[in-house]
Every structure is written in C-alpha cells, then in structure tokens.
Image (cartoon, rainbow, N blue to C red):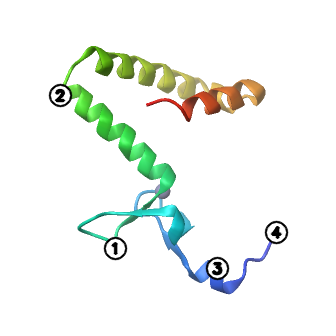
Amino acid sequence: MTVQPEQETASRMGCWCCGSLYPEAELVRLGQHPEVGVCLACARWLQRRALARYDEHHPTPAARARAAVQAVRAAVIRKGWHERGVLGALLRRIDRHLP
Ligand SMILES: [Zn+2]
C-alpha cells in the first residue's frame, strides 16, 4: 500500500458519473455547468451512448455498421473475453479504436 501526499489527495475531484476521484486534468467539465466534471473514461462512455442514441434516430448504413460493432462489443463483454490474458489485451486494444 502506498501513501499519497495529502496535497495530491486533496486536489482530486469526484467524477459525477462513476464517483471515482481524479485530478482536475483528468476531468471534462460541462459548458453551462462547470461544477459538473466527468472522468475521461465516463466521457468516452457518454460519447458512445450519445452516438448510439443519435444513430437510433438517424438510420444510415454507417449507423447500422456502428450498431453491429456495438452488438459484437456487448457480446464480448457479456462473455468476459475482454478479461482473458492475451486475447483480452488484444480486444481492449481494438476497443480503443472503435467508434
Ligand atoms: Zn467516471
């Protein structure tokens, strides 16, 4: 167990989505509500949800392709393949480049 300096711990803020603590540099603030900050992982999750919602209302071939990719992604997560050693590392790397 490591002990973090008190100053570093005090400067961390809670993500309004997941509740974890992050330094200010790793939070994204809302424009009209700067008191609200979400961490980078949650911001990416929100972006994916927003894009999926947009695609639901604007069906295009690209939207259908993204939905298919997300369905495969959901199946991989449901089966836990993303947590399996080398295969999991490869799948997580691929996920970083998915829409
Ligand atoms: Zn978060």
Q: Is there a contact, CB below 8 Å, between mark 1 and mark 3?
A: no
Disc sitting over residue 8 in the figure: 3
Taking the image as shown, residue 79 lies to the left or right of residue 86, namely left
How would you rate the neighbour count of disc 4 (Cα within 10 Å): few for under 14, some for 14-19, many for 20 or more? few
Where is residue 53? Give x, y as percent: 26, 34
Q: Amino acid at mark 4?
A: Met
Say which mark, if any, is on residue 60: none
Gap between marks 2 and 4, in whole Å? 49 Å
Residue at (36%, 21%) from the top-left corner? 67
* In-image side of 78 versus 55 (left or right): right
Q: Secondary structure at mark 4?
A: loop
Q: Residue at x 23, y 67 (%)?
A: 32
Whether the residue under disc 1 has CB within 8 Å of ligand 1 = no
Q: According to the image, label 1 marks what residue? A: 35
Q: Residue at x 47, y 63 (%)?
A: 27
Circle 4 sits on which residue? 1
Q: Residue furthest bottom?
A: 7
Q: Earlier in the sequence, mark 4 or mark 3?
A: 4
Q: Amino acid at mark 1?
A: Glu
**First in sequence: mark 1 vs mark 4:** 4
How crowded is the residue under tag 2: few (<14 C-alpha within 10 Å), some, or many (20+)? Answer: few
Where 73 falls versus 48 (above or below)? Answer: above
Return the disc, 2 or 1, that comes first in the chain's sequence. Answer: 1
